[in-house]
Image (cartoon, helix red, strand yellow):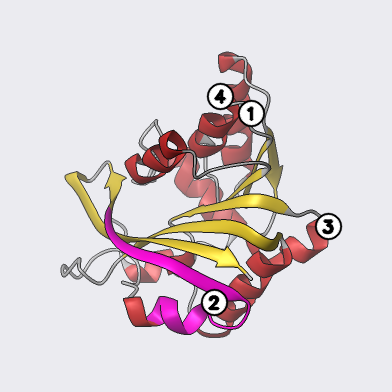
Amino acid sequence: MLDESVYARHQEPSFLEELYETGATPWEIGRPQSAFLALAKSGAIQGRVLDVGCGTGEHVLMCARLGLDSTGIELASNAVRMAQEKASERGLDARFLCYDALKLADLGETFDTILDSGLFHRFQGDERTAYVNSLASAVQPGKRVFVLSFGDQQKEDWGPHRVSRAEFEAAFTEGWRIDAIEESTIDATVDADGVKAWLVSLTRV
């Protein structure tokens, strides 16, 4: 598993592209995360959907299969190409952009549902604040954001920063309602039992 110093470089496009080229991407499991699949089946994912840090596109394609207007953004251009190839092979209509999740305001679009699988925990300090502000610029009041993040229940000393409940509560304050912070799992190729995580449900207010 990658250690935290490696995860700190995950906003470098060239480094991300190297990871995708070599297959050193334990979050790429060839299917949607179980937590997001359950959200989709429950009907919680609606309208125009944006997946931030979409990787090779499994969540975007899941939403496209449901008939939703689905977009994914990712810094790694080779991951975007892989996602586009998957969409073509599966006959699904989905949009993938090589784009920075910290600059959603510049995209000039808003969405009804935003999905974040494994991106929030890469940001700390001022970058985290910038990321939350970026999310706010892309979702209208009353619309939803779902974050699946590495959690502090995972005690081993590998992997990215472990996010606590208190950190979510501090990050999503003015302009947000935290609907739920639930124990969950991130499915990963390195652990058959998955990684302990938080699934955070948010509404823009």
Q: Does dot 4 land on a helix, a strand or a loop?
A: helix
State which region is magenta: 167-184
Residue 68: image location, x then y, percent? 64, 32
Camera-side residue of 200 and 88: 200
Indicate whether residue 177 is drawn in magenta: yes
Give the residue pinned by disc 4.
65
Q: Does dot 1 land on a helix, a strand or a loop?
A: helix
Callout in the foreground (3, 2): 3
Quarter of the rendering occupied by the N terminus:
bottom left
Give the Cα separation between the discs numbered 2 and 4: 31 Å
The mark nearer the N terminus, 2 or 4, is 4
The amino acid sitting under disc 2 is Arg
Camera-side residue of 14 and 182: 182
- Left or right of 38? Residue 140 is right
Q: Which residue is rendered at x = 73% and y = 67% of the image?
A: 137
The mark nearer the N terminus, 1 or 3, is 1
Give the residue pinned by disc 2.
128
Give the residue pinned by disc 1.
84
Indicate whether residue 115 is drawn in magenta: no
Give the Cα separation between the discs numbered 2 and 1: 29 Å
Quarter of the rendering occupied by the C terminus:
bottom right
Residue 23 is at least partly visible in this image: no
Q: Which residue is rendered at x = 51% and y = 85% of the image?
A: 125
Give the residue pinned by disc 3.
108
Q: Residues within 10 Å of mark 1 (few under 14, many from 20)?
A: many
Q: Does dot 2 land on a helix, a strand or a loop?
A: helix
